[in-house]
Image: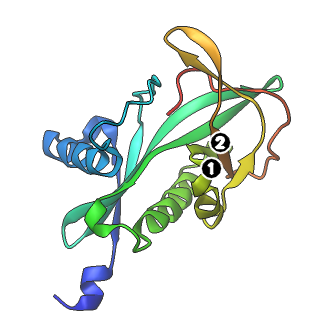
């Protein structure tokens, strides 16, 4: 295998309902490695949605190295309903980080969302330190207040949301009700 072949990321899109047990375990392993807490750190206590519809997966030499999940969700903003591709679990295996693989997966997922149609926006939540990173992929910060469902209660979500237009609609003003837990 040449160096060029080793660095060529192959992208696949997988529907959750058709995942094999082995592929689900690979996805979970990368997710765990990318997001695992260091010893002594606390869980954030947030009830996250467990409703991924499909995955964008990045493969290098037959190994899963980068991924993201998409949650199909209708959200409400200022009296409007919008169809959202909720982006979550953007993760790269620690051995493969800082090589641009997550950006490639984000771009491929955006292209797939446009091909599929039906989405007004892609939307993700992120740490403020990552805002410039996602901005490079075309996402922009939305400053609306965000309300989420947590353990049966509607609460204000103090996280940073970023959106990527997919349909030409402008991002509306008003409070955001994500119509469930965050993804």
Labels 1 and 2 touching (C-beta < 8 A): yes
Say above or below: 49 vs 62: above
What's the residue at 62%, 36% (across, down)?
A: 159
Residue depicted at 45% across the width and 22% down the height: 47
Sequence-earlier tag: 1 or 2: 1
Q: Position of residue 105 (x, y in %)?
A: 44, 62
Q: Position of residue 125 (x, y in %)?
A: 58, 42
Task: Give neighbour class at mark 1: few <14, some 14-19, many 20+ (Cα, 10 Å).
Answer: few
- Provide the residue designation for mark 1: 128
Tell me the element at label 1: helix
Nearer to us of marks 1 and 2 is 1
Task: State whether residue 142 is above or below residue 45.
Answer: below
Q: Secondary structure at mark 2?
A: strand
Q: Residue at x 46, y 68 (%)?
A: 104
How many numbered marks appear?
Answer: 2
Tell whether 165 sits left or right of 56.
Answer: right
Q: Residue at x 13, y 45 (%)?
A: 22
């Amino acid at each position: 295998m040449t160096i060029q072949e080793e660095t060529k990321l192959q992208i696949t899109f997988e529907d959750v309902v058709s995942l094999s047990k082995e592929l689900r375990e690979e996805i979970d392993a990368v997710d765990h490695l990318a997001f695992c807490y260091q010893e002594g750190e606390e869980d954030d206590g947030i009830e996250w949605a467990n409703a991924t519809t499909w995955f964008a997966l990045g493969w290098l030499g037959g190994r899963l190295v980068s991924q993201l999940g998409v949650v199909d969700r209708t959200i409400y903003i200022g009296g409007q309903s919008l169809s959202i591709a909720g982006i979550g679990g953007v993760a790269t295996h620690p051995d493969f980080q800082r090589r641009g693989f997550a950006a490639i997966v984000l771009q491929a997922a955006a292209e797939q969302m446009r091909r599929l149609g039906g989405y007004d926006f892609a939307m993700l939540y992120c740490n403020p330190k990552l805002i410039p990173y996602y901005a490079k992929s075309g996402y922009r910060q939305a400053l609306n207040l965000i309300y989420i469902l947590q353990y049966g209660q509607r609460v204000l979500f103090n996280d940073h949301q970023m959106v990527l237009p997919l349909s030409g609609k402008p991002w509306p003003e008003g409070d955001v009700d994500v119509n469930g837990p965050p993804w």
